[in-house]
Image (cartoon, rainbow, N blue to C red):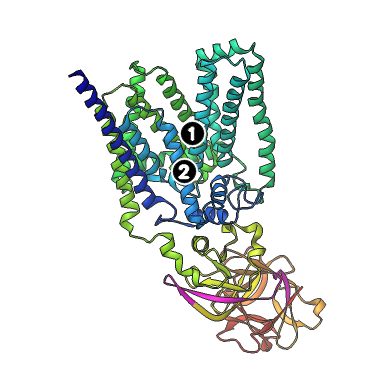
Amino acid sequence: MAGFLKQAASNAGGTNSILYWIGVLFVVCFSFLYYAPCNYALYNSDHAIHVLMAADFQLPRDLYYWGQDRLGSLLPMCAHWLGYILPIHPLYLCSIVQYLFLGTGFLILSSFLQNRPLKIALCALIFLPVNEYNGLILIGHPYASQLFAGSLFAFFLVRLRRHILMQEINDSHAFIKATVLGLGAVLFFLLGIWASEFSAVLAVLPLFYLAFDKELRDRILKQLRSAWFLLSAGLSVLAPGGAVVLYKWMKGSALVTDDIYQKQFIDNGADLAKNFGFFMERLKTTLLFRDPFPFENLFNWTLLVLGFTMIAAFFLKKRMQRPGLARQINFLLLMSILSCIALFFSTWNLRSSFCPRYFIPVYVTFCFALFLFLDGGAFKKIVAAVVSVYFVLNGLAYCYNNVISKKLPGPFEAYAEFNKLPEGTLIGDYWDVYRINSIALHLKSIPYETQTVRNLEFREDVLKNRTFYFLDKWPWPPGGLRDTIIEYRYFFKNSGVKYQCAGTEVRAYAKLGQEPLTKFALRSSDSTYVGLDPESARLLTAERDPSQAAVFELVQTRVGVALKAPNGKFVCADLSQNAALFARSNDPWAWEMFQLVAGGGNSLQLIATNGKYVSADKGMNGALIANRDEAKGWETFFLEPR
């Protein structure tokens, strides 16, 4: 009878193990099907840039996310290396690496849990994140890399603690093991900081051990007499010093200094009050059910209630059945509190109106502390099972509402038709060109708005192509027409060739001129040059000496093209004076915007903000005025670069 019961228990354990792995595989496969970058229906250009980096990874150019000197490129670097083993599309490579990062974090963190339903809850937390915490699973964000590096840092540090407690470091074997564990912890700590500087908060873990783990502290003091221990500790302490030098070199080698993010923390009362206002608004929106998403609000309330329950149990001295578990939970709660304080004072958070996405590391840390608390025997196992089911169902519901129900195509299905375009450069809106380029890798891409260009450092290489494609959709490039587009100080002339790709018309253009246009003079049809009246600053064509012509500077803005005159003022078509042209505006606004239409050779026409052509009206002594419906002789000018 006893043997039968033992065999039955063994079979039950095996059945539970199989059910557990079925549950984990279901969550991971479901997640990959809808959230992996290669399948994600809401795939965007922020994600696509990591794919483009993986396709052509170069150091030191790609040490950081394109266009920044923060957010290290751990994921695209690993995806690029994986490409030497698996010669497949880099979008698939990024998807594989992303899930390896997430899977590594899950396996390490789940090893601290004994209750299998809670392990499945952890799996859902990582692979089916909800609300704005969804950024955890998306490339283009550092959170998966942080999870990967942070969990390995914790793994090596915990193993090092165990090694120090269990074994005297008094021989070469123990020394090597301690040194490898110590350097491993340092390596992944620094990789985490490279992925996101917020990972520096993990330094609290070894400090916490030294401050609150009396057994470890006594053991270290006892081993200070061992030369092997001192050597191992010295190497592990010196490693961060060398790494700091390397880190400074990496920051200095970044192609762009990201001035917006150089100021890390709020340093004045006005910004502090503003951020507190953002925080209160977020609190009211989510906890008072002002958001139109009841499931998401309910989830926030559930976390709040569970969190207060956990804290109350600690105050009531609810006993943990596993030794050392209370210390781990205390550490996680302490790190969550310190992280929230740091994030509250962060200028990143301020600029994003207290965006919950920045709190993803805190969210994962807090939930993991909650799982450890439930795993410690403070409640019956049925509570852990309910929590597990809740996390899984909530993750599935969020995925359905935000991804599945939208019935949008994945990136390959959406953009594969662009592969039929001949080699060239694609110019268009930021949210289009990079994601198209990440599928059609034979193209190069660049957005038409300078502030959204991520590959600004090698923009000139992108502009060396002979064929250029513009997406025939709004928003159209500022200052552009379908006949002629001026972008990045180059003129592009419509070739008349067009393609249909994924329901979008793509027009092919040719670049006029090999050098970017910066400064120029304008000659009218009767060979007189545009100059400025010294008293009124009115534009006139009365100067025959080319050396006396007014030299204008081309200024591109987010909404069009402006002309800066030699007097430092912007040219405007003054609609209060019959659209006559004057150079007297301090800033380029509506009346200062022009469209430049290229003709044959170096001829062009100017269209003012009123939609009229600019004319050198010979009946008004050559005064420039924007009042013509069509372009003829007086409305044609010849551009002479200076």
State the separation of the CA atoms marked 1 and 2.
Answer: 13 Å
Horizontally, residue 275 falls left or right of residue 526, namely left
Q: Is residue 102 above or below residue 512?
A: above
Along the line of sight, the residue nearer the viewer: 542 or 471: 471
Q: Which is more N-terminal, label 2 or label 1?
A: 2
Using a 10 Å C-alpha cutoff, classify the residue at mark 2 as few (fewer than 14 neighbours), some (14 to 19) or many (20 or more). some
Front label number (1 vs 2): 2
Q: Quadrant of the N terminus?
A: top left
In the image, what residue type sits under mark 2? Leu
Q: Is residue 59 above or below residue 594?
A: above
Q: Is residue 315 above or below residue 531?
A: above
Using a 10 Å C-alpha cutoff, classify the residue at mark 1 as few (fewer than 14 neighbours), some (14 to 19) or many (20 or more). many
Q: Quadrant of the C terminus?
A: bottom right
User: How far across and down, in percent of the image, does residue 392 sit?
Assistant: 31, 41
Q: Secondary structure at mark 2?
A: helix
Q: Is residue 634 above or below residue 478?
A: below
- What segment carries the magenta color? 499-522
Q: Which residue is mark 2?
A: 100
In the image, what residue type sits under mark 1? Ser
What residue is at 33 percent from the left and 17 percent from the top? Answer: 318
Horizontally, residue 295 falls left or right of residue 571, namely left
What residue is at 59 percent from the left and 81 percent from the top? Answer: 613
User: How far across and down, in percent of the image, does residue 622 sit?
Assistant: 70, 84
Q: Is residue 305 visible?
A: yes
Q: Secondary structure at mark 1?
A: helix
- 595 falls in the magenta region: no
Q: Please tell me how many numbered marks the rendered image carries.
A: 2
User: How far across and down, in percent of the image, does residue 444 sit?
Assistant: 58, 65
Along the line of sight, the residue nearer the viewer: 167 or 497: 167
Q: Which mark is residue 280?
A: none
Q: Which mark is residue 151?
A: 1
